[in-house]
Image (spheres, helix red, strand yellow):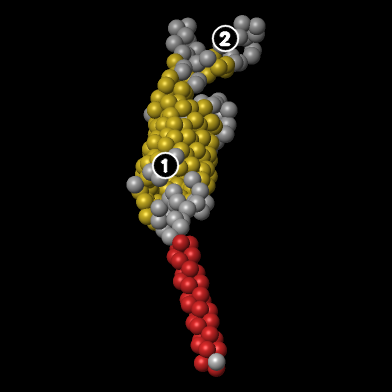
Amino acid sequence: MKKFILSFFALTLFGFVAQAGTETFSGKDSKDVKQVIAPCPEWYGDNEWNLSVWGTYAFTAEDWENDGYLLTDHAWGGGIDFKYFFHRYFGVGIEAFGMNAVRRGMELVEDESSTLEPEPLIAGGPHDSRLIGAVLGTFTLRFPLHCSRFAPYVFGGAGVIFGGGETSTFFDDESENDNDFTTISDTDAEFIGQVGAGFEFRLTRHVGFINDFSWNFVGRDNSDFGMVRAGLNFAF
């Protein structure tokens, strides 16, 4: 009888041990399942090259008659930039853009009401379209949001702008021939500095939409302008 009881307890104990072993194995399986769950996608690489093409709209800080470089209220254009991002957040590159700026001028209008009053200047003088371009070295600080297609960024740059800055000089011929004329100086190249902020939205891992605004400081009085850009970025 005692052997039977001992045998019964031994079998029962063996069953508990076997059951405990089965539970431990099941727990291990659950742990393995958790480990193979795929992480959320990262849309921005730690090391990547970026090539961006964009259209731009620029507007001057001063009215056109007071602006010292673009000599207009606004201009349309486009550009391209090439950057290398290292450790996802920091990028260095080069940017180039061109704008079609219509130079506006003033003309003299004869005042017949009085010979004592000077002849006034009014809008409607020479209008000519010319290309104003710039090349800058840039630095970009990017903040990709984890598991998101969205990445805000700030940037700055410095370089040279060319194609603008003409001056007009009016010569009044007071003789009877009345051969008045206006001369326009050559364009000047000036220093340009740039600061701005914007965002990128990745449509795919390698193609994104960009939109930003920058303020541009030209090395001539009354010549600063704002610039809005929108375009596509290609990452590889």
Kind of residue at badge 1: Thr
Estimate the x, y position of residue 44 in percent, counting from the top left.
43, 50
Q: Quadrant of the N terminus?
A: bottom right
Estimate the x, y position of residue 15 in percent, counting from the top left.
51, 78
Secondary structure of residue under mark 1 = loop
Q: Nearer the viewer, residue 89 or 41?
A: 41
Q: Nearer the viewer, residue 6 or 113?
A: 6
The correct choice, above or below, for 9 with respect to 182 in the image is below
Estimate the x, y position of residue 95 in percent, counting from the top left.
39, 42
The correct choice, above or below, for 22 with respect to 158 in the image is below
Name which residue lies at 64% across and 12% down: 116
Secondary structure of residue under mark 2 = loop
Count neighbours of disc 2 (C-alpha within 10 A) and say few if under 14, some if 14 to 19, many if 20 or more: few
CA–CA distance in space, label 2 to label 1: 63 Å
Q: Which residue reaches farthest bottom? A: 2
Count neighbours of disc 1 (C-alpha within 10 A) and say few if under 14, some if 14 to 19, many if 20 or more: few
Query: Which residue matches tag 1?
Result: 204
Instruction: Mark yes or no: residue 95 visible.
Output: no
Kind of residue at badge 2: Glu
The correct choice, above or below, for 26 with respect to 187 in the image is below
Comparing labels 2 and 1, the label whose residue is closer to the camera? 1
**Left or right, 142 with reference to 115:** left
Name which residue lies at 39% across and 36% down: 53
Residue 150, which numbered label?
A: none
**Figure label count:** 2
Q: Nearer the viewer, residue 225 or 68?
A: 225
Name which residue lies at 48% across and 42% down: 201
Query: Which residue matches tag 2?
Result: 110
Name which residue lies at 47% across and 39% down: 210
